Amino acid sequence: RRSPQLALFTASIRRPASLHHLQAMIRDSMDKMEAMLRGSMSKMDSNYLAEPDVAMMSTEPAPAAAYQAKSPLFRECMAEFLGMLVFMSFGTGVVAQVVLSEGSKGDFLSINLCWGLGVLFGIHVCGGVSGAHLNPAVTVSLALFRRFKWRKVPFYVAAQLLGAFVASAIVCMVYAPLISATDPHKMETQGIFATYPYSDDVPTGTCFLTEVVGTALLVGCLFAIGDEMNKPASPYSQPGAVALLVAAIGMAFGMNTGYAINPARDLGPRLFSLCAGWGTKVFTLSDSYFWVPIIAPMLGGPIGAGMYIVLVEQHHPVEYGHPRA
């Protein structure tokens, strides 16, 4: 003999109206359970799990304030400045640690990795606002090939130089006691900030070529990473891809020059070291080498971008299956 509960359950399955009612009850119960789970989680966890594209710390828009920048260009330049400051703080900091510890607290591998990680975090800081150029050679290359407005170029370059200058000042303050102990007259430690040839055995022409090649690889690969018609890195993996790119360039081509591959990365810290007591020798050492890491990257960047566009991008089909006319 069937129990009353079993009979009621069987009848509810056989009657379509009851089945719909049961489904509605199940959906309602699941909605209530989900609401309870959301209520039990912190706001940050809830946003992270349910809305991965939203910033983890808040889903609310930033409150308007009297100091909020109204100019889009000013916002971009502030972001570029901070991104450059973060990038250069890591990069210059690791060089200071290796130099001042005489290699006991790091080596050339750690330098390459930390420069790459500095780029990664710099991109995360400003990429969504300014595009995270972090390099005048990148900015000029983008403008030259009509990917960026020329009127913005001077402002971006100024922000990049200022960010590199301030980052150098921060690193100098952090390591000031060790710099004073190691090099009280500031005769040997200028290499913490700017780049110089590896030795007198590396001629200026070779250094120039090294910087051109390194920057061409950097900018050409950046164009490839962002090419939607090729196999671009996803928005989530782009910072990591660029970080690996910078580290790889350092590991392959860093010996001759210290791979500036970025005029702001070299000139900003060089100007700081001039102001901070290292003197005019920072511009006269190695036969006035200072111009090489400024001019060579500005030449190498457009070369790399142009090669990628001419050899790859220009040959993408306009639509799949339809070649470019």
Image (cartoon, helix red, strand yellow):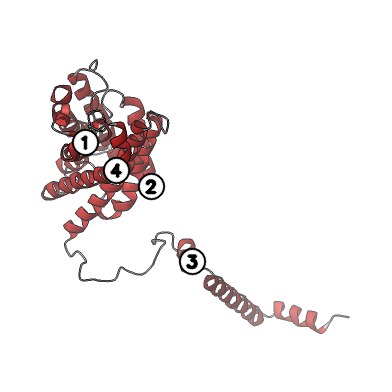
SS under mark 3: helix
Quadrant for the C terminus, please.
top left
Say which label, 3 or 4, has the lower sequence index: 3
Q: Residues within 10 Å of mark 4 (few under 14, many from 20)?
A: many
Looking at the rendered structure, which numbered label has been put on residue 234?
Answer: 2
Looking at the rendered structure, which numbered label has been put on residue 27?
Answer: none
Say which label, 4 or 1, has the lower sequence index: 4
Query: Of discs 2 and 3, which sits in the foreground?
Result: 3
Say above or below: 162 vs 278.
below
Rounded to the nearest whole Å, what is the CA distance between mark 2 and mark 3? 24 Å
Residue ID for mark 1? 266
SS under mark 1: helix
Left/right of residue 33 with respect to residue 256 in the rendered view: right
Quadrant for the N terminus, please.
bottom right
User: What amino acid type is highlighted by mark number 4?
Assistant: Val
Rounded to the nearest whole Å, what is the CA distance between mark 2 and mark 4? 33 Å
Looking at the rendered structure, which numbered label has been put on residue 171?
Answer: 4
User: What amino acid type is highlighted by mark number 1?
Assistant: Asp
